[in-house]
Amino acid sequence: MFMQLRFLQPFFRFSRMTRPALFVICSSLAVAAPSVGLAQDASKAIEKTLVEKTVVEKASIEKAASEKTAVEKVAVEKASTEKPTIAKIVVEKNSVEKPSVEKVKDLDSVYTQPPSDDLSYTLQGEFIGEVIVPAPVAPVDSSKDNSVGEAKDAALAKPTPESKVLGLQLRVVGGENFEGLSFYGGLPGEKAHRPKPMKLIGRRSGDFLVLSGGPWAIFVDKDGCNLVDKTGKPLGRLTRVERQSPTLGAKPPEHAIVLFDGSGTEQFQKATMTEDGLLEEGADLKPMIQDFDLHLEFMLPYMPKKEGQGRGNSGIYIMSRYECQILDSFAQEAVNNSCGAIYLFKPADVNMCLPPLVWQTYDVRFTAPRWAANKTKIRNAKISSWLNGVKVQDDVDVPSSTGHGKPEEPSLLPTLLQDHDCPVRFRNAWIVDRGLMTSDSFPVKATREPTVENSTPKAEKAESKLTAKADASASKPPTEPAK
């Protein structure tokens, strides 16, 4: 009977899921049908049902597409009648009236002048004073026999407090948040300074700040800091200090080349001077000098919402190869990319960076590498540097270019004041070409071996002197005695 159902084969040209279902249905109808005619009628009914279903699905898809088109059309018509968005208004306003540079800096929290409306700025800085530090309590060993009462006496014994000098540095890290470092012995660069800091964190409330992280709580106001213990007992007060570099305002020596004194930028290949007579970052020096002593003064911008290398970044790119880093790393530990570092090569021996918006000094002594005729290097470059009058790099041997500096080769390249999109300012810059300095000890006199004429032994010289003296005495006339 299945041989007579060949007319149903076209209906099996569906997916694998559809064919088995149709096969079962047709088989059932074929078995139940008393004749082949009934089977044919059943197959026609199935075909009609499938066609109707396809038509319904197609109509549903067309209806959905039509409704979507209608919605999009309404949205477009609505958008064309609505007012422009805020973003569009801002663009149109800026195209007519561009904000000034200072306004943009205020919006980005970047300042080249002290802000008048930032309470956090008034709290940052350096503080120093004497505080009472309790001596640590010796732990009690409970495993020992306490019958004699030694452990009890040790537990009850009061430690003897001592007075110590404490230095504190505070920096703003966005909004009301602060980070700080405190040092026993004083601030960085002072003789008794101990380099291992205590790290502190705090948050401003109104015009004062509360710091924690040490063995005390610190309440900071614009003039100083009060320290209290956990019971609220006063431990001391630190006073605000504003340190100044001993080389600030140093006048150029007689043979120095004045690079910048506020009168012009003639000593730079490219440079921009501000309206108030300061040199901007991104200046390229004209003089290409091999061995030199460089002095310059710089001011870091106040960028409280920036971090790391995005905060007051510049640098002295010696010969476009070796960078002495400039960065707002005040109140931070010295690392190989902080202020005073030979960038990514060696950290400063001590972090002598001062707070932003105060004038600081950088003094650099550079000795260029030496080369042979076949372009092989004979001797590495040498760098010594002083940050705010304190030596932070001591005759450091630099084997290659640093950071993103250009490759070493036996040729001179200009020294740059790096542009890192931070408004660092410079003034009082001068350089001494050590290759032009004269020496009082030149020419050098030779040390000669004794000749035949002056090789007479000392004893013979002494005897000849005595003989000459006796002969001279004998030849003199006798003197008459005084009457």
Image (cartoon, helix red, strand yellow):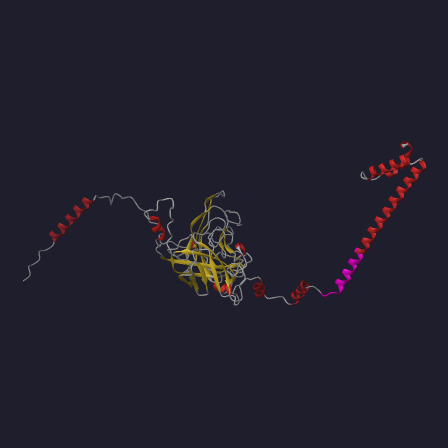
Q: Give the residue at x 53% y 47%.
A: 407
Q: Position of residue 134 (x, y in %)?
A: 38, 56
Number of marks present in the image shown:
0
**Which region is colored magenta?**
68-83
Q: Residue furthest front?
A: 147
Percent x, y of residue 17: 80, 39
Quarter of the picture holding the C terminus = bottom left
Q: Is residue 186 magenta?
A: no
Q: Position of residue 205 (x, y in %)?
A: 51, 63
Q: Nearer the viewer, residue 122 or 364?
A: 122
- Check if residue 75 falls in the magenta segment: yes
Between 334 and 71, the one lying in front of the other is 71
Q: Quadrant of residue 21?
A: top right
Residue 1 appears in view: yes
Give the answer, above or below, for where 441 lies relative to 21: below
- Magenta residues, dominant SS class: helix
Q: Position of residue 16 (x, y in %)?
A: 80, 38
Name the image quarter holding residue 218: bottom left
Q: Which residue is outermost to the left?
A: 483
Left or right position of 19 against 303? right
On the question of residue 261 being in view, the answer is no
313 to 454, vertically: above or below = below
The answer to which of 304 and 280 lies nearer the viewer is 304
Q: Quadrant of the N terminus?
A: top right
Q: Which residue is found at the position 17% from the left and 48% from the top?
A: 465
Q: Is residue 159 left or right of residue 14?
A: left
| Residue nearest the observer in this picture, 121 or 276 | 121
